[in-house]
């Protein structure tokens, strides 16, 4: 809890929303639709920057298949209420209302046909329609919350918010400040975590997630040499497996499969990569031994893998058999090589960090938040939504849907 600051505040609102991203704008427009006077204070110089750059500028705004199992949270049941109160179909209805054309891609992902700007314009139009006010470049210095007993008894409950854009009072404060990912956009200050701690809430360890992994040593050299090569794989860690494309980069590994895996991986853990998930490598090699015995291992594997990848792996996995016809290689050796292809184990040195992370894993402890309202259980009028909470979605529109759902729920429950 911060100390009281000298001086009087300028204006009073029913709701102040800290953060003008996806969750913040959804909270604001929903509260405005309930007849509330709403102010959005955004720390950067533009609303919805993360919306605009998402999905390669096309904004993967939701997914057709939204399940609680698509979200990582210390309490796996926490997300269910919000996701049921405001579904992907509800958001799609708003998209259709604004005549935004979109396309379904793999795994139920929905992308704008034209531009992510269409989603931002839709949200700001909905805000404008209900009189939501916006202040940009707004840095918050202090938030003063009433004692819980006062907040419950006082029908004129007043939360004070002050910063470089002035001083304000509100009955409800919605914290939609996001996480620490992509700091270059200007909004990843971590202020929401600071405010949570000052308010007596615990914040779990936060980390970059949905992020490329880095490698060192020989595997870094291999990946650097293969930069730009993609291959369909199954990657796994701690019993979590994802079947998608993997991309070699000049620093390590990326692509949808690796981004998904980063949600579950922690520093020092070993990951496993199946380079041929659709084929039994051992069966293929043994069959070739009887049908095309003059082939080498490299030429055989190149039928199912990029030739450049096979050539790069040769010095590490079968250097002594580089030019040996497959008929001259023992079955046990072929089995060992096949096992390496299906279970390439390595330990990433880290990730590319918040600079390229799509989300922040961890956040405000959800045990302190009402899953039905997003309100802090012991502080009436204080709400946390979106990425600020300890909820992380899979790649594919799930984090946006969490922003829409949690923002809607908060906007509906401000008093």
Image (spheres, grey):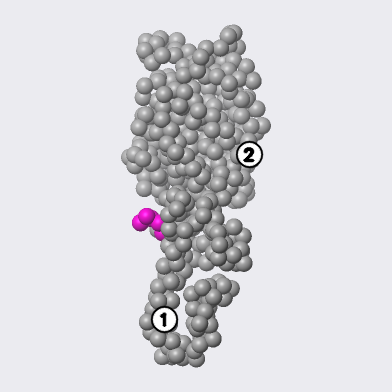
The question of residue 238 being in magenta is answered with: yes
Which residue occupies 58% across, 11% down? 9
Point out the tag, 2 or 1, that comes first from the N-terminus: 2
Residue 239 seen in render: yes
Residue position for label 2:
185
Residue 129 seen in render: no
Image position, residue 113 (x, y; %): 59, 51
The answer to whether the residues at label 2 and label 1 have Cβ atoms under 8 Å apart is no
Residue position for label 1:
334
Is 181 situated left or right of 68 in this image?
Answer: right
Of the two numbered discs 2 and 1 in the rendering, the one whose residue sits closer to the viewer: 1
Image position, residue 116 (x, y; %): 60, 44
Residues in magenta, as a range: 236-240
Towards the viewer: 262 or 38? 262
Classed neighbour count for the residue bearing mark 1: other residues with Cα under 10 Å, few (<14), some (14–19), many (≥20): many
Q: Quadrant of residue 370?
A: top left
| Secondary structure state at the residue bearing disc 1 | helix
The Cα–Cα distance between marks 2 and 1, rounded to whole angstroms, is 50 Å
Which residue occupies 45% across, 29% down? 384
Image position, residue 223 (x, y; %): 57, 64
Q: Quadrant of residue 311?
A: bottom right
């Amino acid at each position: 809890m911060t100390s009281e600051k000298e001086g009087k505040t300028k204006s009073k609102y029913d709701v102040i929303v800290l953060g003008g991203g996806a969750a913040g704008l959804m909270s604001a427009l929903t509260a405005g639709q309930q007849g509330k006077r709403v102010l959005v204070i955004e720390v950067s110089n533009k609303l919805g920057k993360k919306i605009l750059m998402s999905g390669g500028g096309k904004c993967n705004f939701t997914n057709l298949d939204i399940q609680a199992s698509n979200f990582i949270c210390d309490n796996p049941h926490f997300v269910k209420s919000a996701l049921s109160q405001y579904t992907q179909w509800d958001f799609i209805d708003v998209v259709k209302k604004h005549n935004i054309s979109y396309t379904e891609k793999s795994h139920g992902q929905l992308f704008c046909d034209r531009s992510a700007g269409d989603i931002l314009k839709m949200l700001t139009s909905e805000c404008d329609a209900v009189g939501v006010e916006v202040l940009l470049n707004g840095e918050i210095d202090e938030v003063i919350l009433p004692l819980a007993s006062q907040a419950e008894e006082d029908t004129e409950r007043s939360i004070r918010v002050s910063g470089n854009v002035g001083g304000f009072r509100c009955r409800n404060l919605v914290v939609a400040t996001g996480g620490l990912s992509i700091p270059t956009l200007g909004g990843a200050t971590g202020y929401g975590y600071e405010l949570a701690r000052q308010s007596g809430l615990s914040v779990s360890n936060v980390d970059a997630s949905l992020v490329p992994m880095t490698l060192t040593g020989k595997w870094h050299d291999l990946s650097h040499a293969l930069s730009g090569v993609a291959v369909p794989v199954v990657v796994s860690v701690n019993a979590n497996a994802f079947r998608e494309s993997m991309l070699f980069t000049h620093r390590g590994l990326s692509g949808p499969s690796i981004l998904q895996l980063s949600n579950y991986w922690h520093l020092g853990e070993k990951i496993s990569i199946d380079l041929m998930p659709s084929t039994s490598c051992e069966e293929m090699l043994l069959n070739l031994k009887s049908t095309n015995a003059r082939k080498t291992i490299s030429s055989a594997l190149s039928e199912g893998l990029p030739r450049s990848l096979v050539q790069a792996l040769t010095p590490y996995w079968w250097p002594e058999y580089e030019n040996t016809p497959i008929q001259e290689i023992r079955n046990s050796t072929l089995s060992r090589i096949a096992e390496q292809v299906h279970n390439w184990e390595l330990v990433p040195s880290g990730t590319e960090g918040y600079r390229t992370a799509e989300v922040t894993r961890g956040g405000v402890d959800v045990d302190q938040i009402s899953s039905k309202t997003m309100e802090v259980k012991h502080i009436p009028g204080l709400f946390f939504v979106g990425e600020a909470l300890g909820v992380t979605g899979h790649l594919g529109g799930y984090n946006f849907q969490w922003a829409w759902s949690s923002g809607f729920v908060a906007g509906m429950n401000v008093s």
